[in-house]
Amino acid sequence: MIYNFNQYSNKSQARQDTIIDMYRSLFKKNSIPKFQDYITLCANQVEGDELENGSELKQLINSNFISLNQFYGVDIDKSTIEMNKAVGGANWVYSDLLSFLIDNMDKLNPALINIDSVFYDKRKITELLSDVLLLISENYNSDCMVVSNFVLNNPYLCSNINSDKMKEVIEKEVKEYQTNLLSNRFYRDTVKVGWKQYHKHYVYSSTGKACMATFVYYRYMINDQVL
Ligand SMILES: C[S@@+](CC[C@H](N)C(=O)[O-])C[C@H]1O[C@@H](n2cnc3c(N)ncnc32)[C@H](O)[C@@H]1O
């Protein structure tokens, strides 16, 4: 595995790199096909009745990556979703992500799922990720990419250490993450076979304090077969 220790000074740059550019480069498509959806843990994206500058949805639209109606912003925080609803045309969903995917299996066709979590708990993120990958494997036959973010332990550590020490910390964290993934039965028995994991990961400091890791999973489909 090759590590890429990109440092991002802001969230927009990280999204550009790990979502938009990554998808374009992996699938050789400028935008998500019209018949597919972009599904994300959304948080607040709106200011008043307009998309906030720097919000995920505004960035995706400005990059001609998706149309408004392809966007599903899901959040377990009800007030966040209610506020986002001030912007019409997109799909704002008050739900747990996995429940939403399960309950709407026949209505959706995910091209990209952004599990943009701020979980520290690696078991929690690897369980959610494994469940999402399994669900897609068993129910859809289109190209798909899943982005999974989590917070590296000790948010203050990364800003205070030199790059060698940082590399050491990250390698330990990533190993722990991979071990957790492989201990998940769904991941080990089903998902690992059909999905490729991008061999780079990114670490950025979105607030100047938190260090995030991003892993990207993708699969290509040709004639209903995983490539
Ligand atoms: C980091 S924020 C998302 C940021 C957004 N994607 C962006 O780029 O600006 C994560 C959000 O996920 C929500 N969340 C956490 N776990 C969730 C779950 N299982 N289902 C739905 N929403 C969840 C949190 O309430 C939080 O608002």
Image: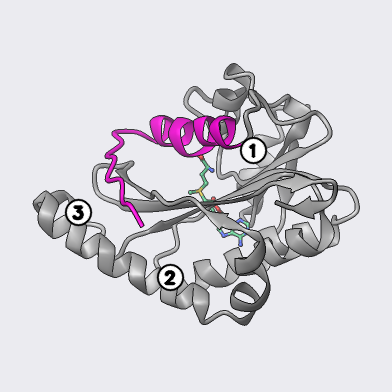
Q: Which mark is residue 158?
A: 3
| Vertical placement of residue 110 versus 12, above or below | below
User: Percent position (x, y) of residue 199?
Assistant: 42, 52
> In percent of the image, x 63 and y 57: which residue is there?
76
Q: Amino acid at mark 1?
A: Met
Disc number placed over residue 178 in the picture, else none: 2
Q: Quadrant of residue 46?
A: top right
Q: CA distance from mark 1 to mark 3?
A: 33 Å
Residue receiving disc 1:
83
Residue 191, how many percent across, how many down?
Answer: 65, 67
Q: Residue at x 26, y 60 (%)?
A: 170
Mark 1 touches mark 3? (CB < 8 Å): no
Amino acid type of the residue that numbered disc 3 sits on in the rendered structure: Cys
Mark 2, mark 1: which one is toward the viewer? Answer: 2
The nearer-to-camera label among 1 and 3 is 3
Residue 54 seen anywhere in this rendered image of the structure: yes
Residue 106's x, y, as percent? 90, 53
Of labels 2 and 1, earlier in sequence is 1
Q: Which residues are magenta?
A: 1-26
| Distance CA(mark 2)–CA(mark 1) | 37 Å
Instruction: Name the residue located 47 percent from the left edge and 26 percent from the top edge.
Output: 54
Mark before the other along the chain sequence, 1 or 3:
1
